[in-house]
């Protein structure tokens, strides 16, 4: 259930929503018109990937800059439109990758299963609890269909993506409470802790580290592996890359986290793993780009894991931006990530 379909979330009226969409189209058109002047052929990858990266970067910068400037109810209306489009487009994409989508509720939280091999039963190989990104304020599981299908196919595991509550309507810890309830219910329903992988990207990656903190507090079993794509860590934004890479990344220069934190100290270990005890983390896979604003915080996070002797696999892709495997799954760089993620997950699981 995308946020705009929740009974307690407001959306814009039809005329206002239509004007918001028209404004978005205009903003996107103006942004895309600048691409040829940015020398999109330059870069460290093959020509098609360089052009794709430049085009994707500008498209997302225009979209995110515009959408985050809107009143919340207009933002939710645009999100509804995108979700409706994904409802039509994404299931055939998932089927083409040999993955079946199934909408369910777990612990009262709606979400989507992605089952490999076109089946409708959870894979015996393992389960990935995937927390979608969106900066704690946007997106939904259906928008992640292609990305989650790639992970399911690469790992042979079933992937469940909960539609947890988002800010500003539901600030911290609402989303954390949702995903913790989902995990407890999965365990009650028979999830084997030895075949459980936790994963997430962007805000979902930050939420995954919050869940690890919560799991230890609640004495629940740890996952056997953690997979993170461009996780939003160190929300104080004190690192040099926040400004140095502002012109290279897809994120707006004024990253909106205040609606999520809602007065919580950004250094609180419940939202910042750099101020948490990471010594008990499971083996961890981290992929990010060296052109993203969170580059330095992620590097600090990886260094903390290594100092604590946590096994960690790291891909820092040159010339790439925030969550590039999600935005450019067809690129060579992303395909390498999917291969490595699949191998990492399989290596974390016990032998059959």
Image (cartoon, rainbow, N blue to C red):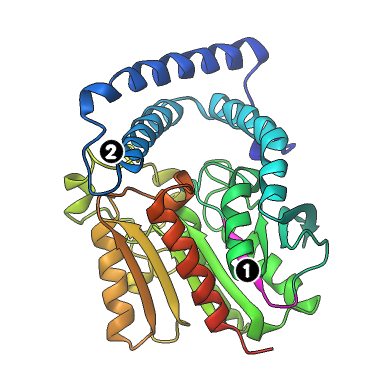
The main secondary structure of the magenta stretch is: strand
Residue 212 at what x, y percent from top left? 51, 74
The C terminus lies in quadrant: bottom right
Where is mark 1, residue-wise? Answer: 128
Q: Is tag 2's residue or tag 1's residue first in the polypeptide sequence?
A: 1
Residue 133 at what x, y percent from top left? 50, 51
Residue 67 at what x, y percent from top left? 46, 28
Where is mark 2, residue-wise? Answer: 253
Q: Is residue 219 visible?
A: yes
Q: Along the line of sight, which residue is nearer the eye, 303 or 219?
A: 303
Q: Nearer the viewer, mark 2 or mark 1?
A: 1
Query: Against 157, is 41 above or below?
Result: above
The quarter holding residue 268 reads: bottom left
Could you classify mark 2 by the number of other residues whose Cα lies within 10 Å: few (under 14), some (14-19), or many (20 or more)?
A: some
Query: Against 168, is 304 above or below?
Result: below
Could you classify mark 1 by the number of other residues whose Cα lies within 10 Å: few (under 14), some (14-19), or many (20 or more)?
A: many
Residue name at image x 43 percent, y 29 percent: 63
Q: Is residue 127 magenta?
A: yes
**Residue 120 left/right relative to 61:** right
Residue name at image x 63 percent, y 77 percent: 196
What secondary structure is marked by label 1? Answer: strand
> Which span of residues is magenta-colored?
124-131
The quarter holding residue 93 reads: top right
The residues bearing labels 2 and 1 have C-alpha atoms spaced at a distance of 32 Å
């Amino acid at each position: 259930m995308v946020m705009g379909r929740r009974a307690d979330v407001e959306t814009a009226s039809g005329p206002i929503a239509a004007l918001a969409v028209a404004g978005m189209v205009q903003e996107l058109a103006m942004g895309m018109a600048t691409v040829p002047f940015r020398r999109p052929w330059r870069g460290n990858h093959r020509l098609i990937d360089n052009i794709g990266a430049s085009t994707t970067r500008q498209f997302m910068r225009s979209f995110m800059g515009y959408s985050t400037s809107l009143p919340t109810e207009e933002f939710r209306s645009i999100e509804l439109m995108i979700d409706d489009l994904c409802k039509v487009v994404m299931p055939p994409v998932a089927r083409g990758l040999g993955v079946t989508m199934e909408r369910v509720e777990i612990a009262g939280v709606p979400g989507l299963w992605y089952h490999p091999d076109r089946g409708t039963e959870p894979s015996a190989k393992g389960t990935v609890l995937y927390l979608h990104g969106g900066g704690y304020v946007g997106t939904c599981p259906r928008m992640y269909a292609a990305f989650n299908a790639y992970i399911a196919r690469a790992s042979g595991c079933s992937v469940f993506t909960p539609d947890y509550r988002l800010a500003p309507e539901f600030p911290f810890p609402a989303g954390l409470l949702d995903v913790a309830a989902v995990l407890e219910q999965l365990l009650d329903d028979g999830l084997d802790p030895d075949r459980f992988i936790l994963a997430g990207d962007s805000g979902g990656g930050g939420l995954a580290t919050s869940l690890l903190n919560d799991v230890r507090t609640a004495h629940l079993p740890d996952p056997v592996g953690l997979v993170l794509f461009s996780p939003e860590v160190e929300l104080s934004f004190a690192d040099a890359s926040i400004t140095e890479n502002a012109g290279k990344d897809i994120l707006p220069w004024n990253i909106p986290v205040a609606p999520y934190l809602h007065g919580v100290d950004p250094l609180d270990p419940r939202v910042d793993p750099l101020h948490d005890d990471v010594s008990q983390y499971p083996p961890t896979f981290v992929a990010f780009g060296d052109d993203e604003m969170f580059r330095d915080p992620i590097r600090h996070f990886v260094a903390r894991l290594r100092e604590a002797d946590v096994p960690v696999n790291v891909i820092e892709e040159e010339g790439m931006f925030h969550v590039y495997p999600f935005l450019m799954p067809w690129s060579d760089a992303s395909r390498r990530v999917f291969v490595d993620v699949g191998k990492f997950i399989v290596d974390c699981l016990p032998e059959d």
